[in-house]
Image (cartoon, rainbow, N blue to C red):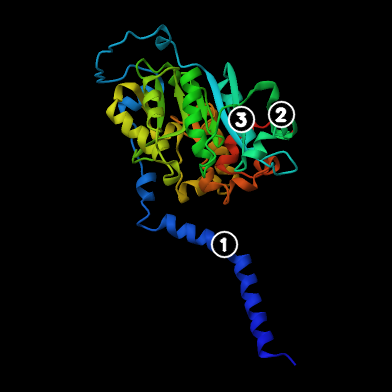
């Protein structure tokens, strides 16, 4: 005979199982409501906008209108009159121990990001700066091997085109997000070498030739994030070496507690600095690097299935522009923080080739033929 206690236990177990299997869907629903409700502010981020004359001058390498810059107290160096170096920088921080049978987390999407730089930028060099991280210092002290570079199938494909540089300096293991570890590193590399930094979810779609001509003292090029232009995002940066703006930016990290913020030092603060020192930065329109933006609707627009007729339309646009969806677009930041669970995490070479989405159309030309 079934007892009341057994029935209660069965009901509790059934409820636990139901919650377990429905939890991802509940999380997505909660995320959808949080992001799309009228109070979320996302409509302000994705509303229509018009590029300014100054933004377009930065984008196309022409003289900046109405420019009033205080006279320099130190004569500019000869390097300041040279274009920004056409070299690319990526940063990869690999947690130890490595997952995926010792191959680490560098995946197909990361491979596409580096391939996009190879194909679109045709840079003089690509530097892949990497390091191993762990909460256990003892584990790192004994970690002298290099499995990420030796074993990863996607990195193996990139080896003929990329210079791999293992970072030997100290890393702040107290930081909760690896993105914050990379925030200062990218600025340090650009300050030393100059060039173009790209996040591992940022895809170069066309050459940056005109942007790299940014006139001195505008030695740093940043793109606005969102049509409301609340920030200048550090996911893509072009800079001359030894720039005053990058030095100022680096100095703001002294004493900063990055665990108490997400995007202040990476998006909001550079906008504030640019407002105080407008002669040191070239600011690009939102559609140059960061459009479509990170909102729920924009991410869905990039990844939703489209018809064959729609695909042909966008393929025609890409042929006309040289690889992008929009006239001013030089790159696309895929917003992995917002898009990985919903869309990016499922992508494979087969899916990118066979399923028509706007994102997949952009990515196909970066894949090697044997994939």
Relative image position of residue 39 (x, y in whole percent):
35, 56
- Image quarter of residue 365: top right
Going from N to C along the chain, the mark reached first, 1 or 2, is 1
Specify the label residue 236 is tagged with.
none
Q: Dots 3 and 1: beta carbons under 8 Å?
A: no
Specify the label residue 25 is tagged with.
1
Residue situated furthest bottom in the rendering: 1
Q: Dots 3 and 2: beta carbons under 8 Å?
A: no
Relative image position of residue 145 (x, y in whole percent):
72, 31
* Residue at x-position 66% and y-position 34%: 141
* Residue at x-position 45% and y-position 36%: 290
Q: Nearer the viewer, residue 333 or 247?
A: 247
Badge 1 marks a residue whose secondary structure is helix
> Which residue is the site of mark 3?
130
Res 106 visible:
no
Q: Taking 170 as reference, is 255 left or right?
A: left
Query: For the residue carrying disc 2, how many other residues have a C-alpha within 10 Å: few (<14), some (14-19), or many (20+)?
Result: few
Q: Is the N terminus in the top left, top right, bottom left or bottom right quadrant?
A: bottom right
Res 352 visible:
yes
Marks 3 and 1 sit apart, C-alpha to C-alpha, by: 35 Å
> Which residue is the site of mark 2?
157
Relative image position of residue 255 (x, y in whole percent):
39, 36
Going from N to C along the chain, the mark reached first, 3 or 1, is 1
Going from N to C along the chain, the mark reached first, 3 or 2, is 3
Q: Taking 73 as reference, is 323 left or right?
A: right
- Image quarter of residue 60: top left
Badge 2 marks a residue whose secondary structure is helix
Badge 3 marks a residue whose secondary structure is strand
Q: Dots 1 and 2: beta carbons under 8 Å?
A: no
Q: Is 155 located above or below residue 355 in the figure?
A: above
Marks 3 and 2 sit apart, C-alpha to C-alpha, by: 17 Å
Query: For the residue carrying disc 3, how many other residues have a C-alpha within 10 Å: few (<14), some (14-19), or many (20+)?
Result: some
């Amino acid at each position: 005979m079934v007892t009341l206690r057994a029935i209660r236990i069965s009901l509790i177990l059934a409820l636990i199982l139901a919650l377990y299997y429905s939890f991802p869907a509940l999380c997505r629903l909660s995320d959808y409501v949080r992001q799309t409700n009228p109070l979320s502010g996302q409509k302000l981020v994705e509303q229509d906008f018009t590029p300014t004359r100054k933004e377009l001058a930065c984008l196309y390498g022409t003289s900046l209108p109405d420019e009033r810059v205080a006279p320099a107290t130190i004569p500019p160096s000869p390097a300041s009159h040279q274009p920004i170096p056409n070299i690319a920088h990526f940063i990869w921080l690999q947690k130890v121990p490595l997952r995926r049978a010792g191959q680490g987390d560098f995946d197909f999407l990361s491979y596409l990001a580096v391939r996009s730089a190879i194909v679109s930028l045709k840079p003089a060099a690509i530097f892949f700066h990497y390091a191993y991280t762990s909460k256990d210092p003892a584990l790192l002290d004994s970690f002298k091997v290099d499995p990420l570079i030796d074993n990863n199938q996607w990195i193996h494909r990139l080896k003929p085109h990329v210079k791999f540089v293992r970072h030997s300096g100290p890393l702040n293991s107290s930081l909760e997000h690896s993105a914050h570890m990379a925030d200062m590193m990218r600025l340090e590399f650009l300050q030393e070498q100059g060039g173009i930094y790209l996040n591992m979810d940022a895809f170069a779609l066309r050459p940056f030739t005109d942007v790299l001509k940014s006139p001195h003292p505008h030695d740093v090029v940043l793109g606005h994030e969102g049509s409301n232009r609340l920030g200048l995002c550090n996911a893509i940066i072009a800079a001359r070496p030894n720039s005053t703006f990058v030095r100022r930016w680096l100095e703001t990290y002294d004493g900063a507690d990055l665990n108490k913020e997400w995007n202040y030092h990476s998006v909001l603060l550079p906008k504030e600095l640019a407002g105080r020192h407008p002669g040191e930065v070239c600011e690009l329109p939102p559609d140059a690097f960061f459009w479509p933006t990170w909102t729920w609707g924009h991410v869905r627009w990039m990844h939703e299935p489209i018809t064959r007729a729609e695909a042909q339309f966008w393929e025609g646009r890409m042929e006309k522009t040289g690889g992008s969806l929009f006239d001013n677009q030089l790159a696309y930041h895929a917003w992995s923080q917002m898009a990985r669970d919903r869309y990016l995490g499922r992508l494979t070479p087969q899916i990118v080739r066979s399923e028509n989405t706007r994102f997949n159309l952009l990515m196909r030309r970066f894949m090697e033929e044997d994939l």
